[in-house]
Amino acid sequence: PDPDRQQLMNIGRQHFPAGNTERMGKIADIVLRLGKTARDQRRRPPGASEFLDAIRACESLDVQVSDEPGSVWSSLERAVIHKDTRS
């Protein structure tokens, strides 16, 4: 079964104990929302590995989660969580 929000947060804290928990929570919510959409479309949903990849990138680059089109986050989300193959 796919991890729920609490499980994702626990995983995130274990891997990034000094990480920004507010940002982790936002990323967890996005992963869960996109996971539902992916399952509805019979695609592989993002999971814990994509969640951790997104946190790692955000922590390394100090990226803020944003719903603004063209933001660094939107590009990161497509590349890391969606696994978008568009160039």
Image (cartoon, grey):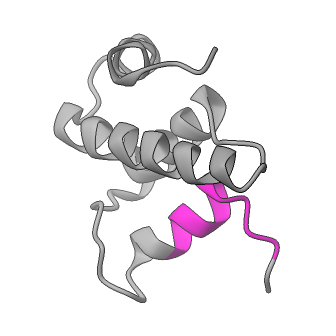
Q: Residue at x 51, y 47 (%)?
A: 54
Residue 37, image x and y in percent? 57, 53
Residue 80, image x and y in percent? 63, 55
Q: Nearer the viewer, residue 66 or 40?
A: 40
Q: Residue furthest left?
A: 22
Q: Residue at x 41, y 10 (%)?
A: 14
- The quadrant the N terminus occupies is top right
Is 1 placed left or right of 84 in the picture?
A: left
Name above or below for residue 57 compared with residue 47: below
Place residue 11 in its image quadrant.
top left
Name above or below for residue 53 compared with residue 34: above
Residue 60, image x and y in percent? 44, 49
Q: Is residue 83 magenta?
A: yes
Name above or below for residue 2 compared with residue 54: above
Is 14 placed left or right of 50 in the picture?
A: left
Q: Is residue 57 magenta?
A: no
| Residue range of the region highlighted in magenta in the rendering | 75-85
